[in-house]
Image (cartoon, helix red, strand yellow):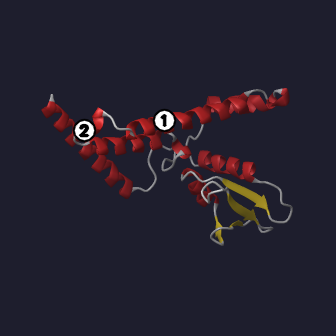
């Protein structure tokens, strides 16, 4: 199994500190959220008991983002989740959510493959810039699934990301001007 496919093992010590077994250092919940945004699977286990604590910590990450005013999930979805726990057997909500996220990931992958495939659009000047913008847009729209977006209305990173956004806007304007000349 490739290194990237294996879950990153995080051990929780009795002191509740979280230890990254790959880098041999302590990590925070934000560090773990960053690993996940980068596409890495994580597994968090209690060192003493061996219990899998992954679900508990992932829910805690979501709760902390919500408490900071970052709307990770709409209130209607949160209400539906609570209701689904009241249904004997857990209802269909967990299966529905898993299927929805699987379809979203598959759609993203197909879209990126289609953009990468040789097509007449690739001959248009500025196509690579447009492709990069599309990838950035997809990352922003998928929030924590594929990185970089906090869900609170602004990308993480502050001024550096604003500079990137300005560059993208400039590239888009240049592309639009070139397309106007071609028409």
Q: List x then y, in percent, for residue 31.
A: 59, 60
Quadrant location of residue 176? top left
Quadrant location of residue 158? bottom left
Query: How dense is the environment of label 2, judged by Cα within 10 Å: few (below 14), some, or many (20 and up)?
Result: few
Circles 1, 2 touching at the beta carbon (< 8 Å)? no
Query: How dense is the environment of label 1, judged by Cα within 10 Å: few (below 14), some, or many (20 and up)?
Result: few
Quadrant that contains the N terminus:
bottom right
Residue 48 in view here: yes
Residue visible at 61% across and 35% down in the picture: 102
Q: List x then y, in percent, for residue 11.
A: 74, 64
Q: List x then y, in percent, for residue 162.
A: 35, 52
Residue visible at 64% across and 52% down in the picture: 41
Q: For this rendering, which residue is in front, 137 or 108?
A: 108
The residue labelled by disc 1 is: 110
Q: List x then y, in percent, for residue 100.
A: 61, 31
The residue labelled by disc 2 is: 123
Where disc 2 sits, the SS reads helix
Residue visible at 85% across and 27% down in the picture: 88
Where disc 1 sits, the SS reads helix
The single residue placed furthest to the front in the displayed view is 118
Q: Which of marks 2 and 1 precedes in the sequence?
A: 1
Residue 74 in view here: no
Quadrant that contains the C terminus:
top left
Q: CA distance from mark 1 to mark 2?
A: 21 Å
The single residue placed furthest to the bottom in the displayed view is 24
The single residue placed furthest to the left in the displayed view is 181
Q: For this rendering, which residue is in front, 121 or 165?
A: 121
Residue visible at 72% across and 33% down in the picture: 94
Which mark is on residue 148?
Answer: none
Question: With respect to residue 132, does 77 lie above or below?
Answer: above
Q: For this rendering, which residue is in front, 169 or 80?
A: 169
């Amino acid at each position: 199994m490739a290194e990237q496919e294996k879950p990153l093992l995080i051990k929780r010590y009795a002191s509740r500190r979280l230890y990254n077994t790959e880098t041999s250092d302590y990590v925070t919940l934000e560090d773990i959220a960053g690993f996940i945004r980068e596409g890495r699977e994580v597994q968090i286990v209690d060192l003493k008991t061996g219990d899998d604590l992954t679900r508990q910590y992932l829910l805690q990450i979501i709760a902390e983002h919500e408490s900071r005013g970052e709307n990770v999930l709409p209130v209607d979805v949160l209400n539906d989740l609570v209701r689904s726990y009241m249904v004997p057997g857990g209802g269909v909500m967990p299966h529905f959510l898993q299927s929805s996220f699987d379809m979203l990931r598959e759609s993203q992958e197909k879209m990126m493959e289609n953009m990468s495939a040789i097509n007449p659009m690739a001959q248009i000047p500025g196509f690579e810039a447009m492709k990069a913008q599309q990838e950035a847009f997809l990352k922003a729209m998928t929030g924590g699934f594929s990185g970089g977006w906090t869900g609170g209305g602004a990308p993480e990173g502050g001024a550096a990301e604003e500079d990137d956004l300005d560059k993208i806007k400039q590239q888009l304007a240049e592309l639009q001007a070139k397309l106007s000349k071609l028409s």
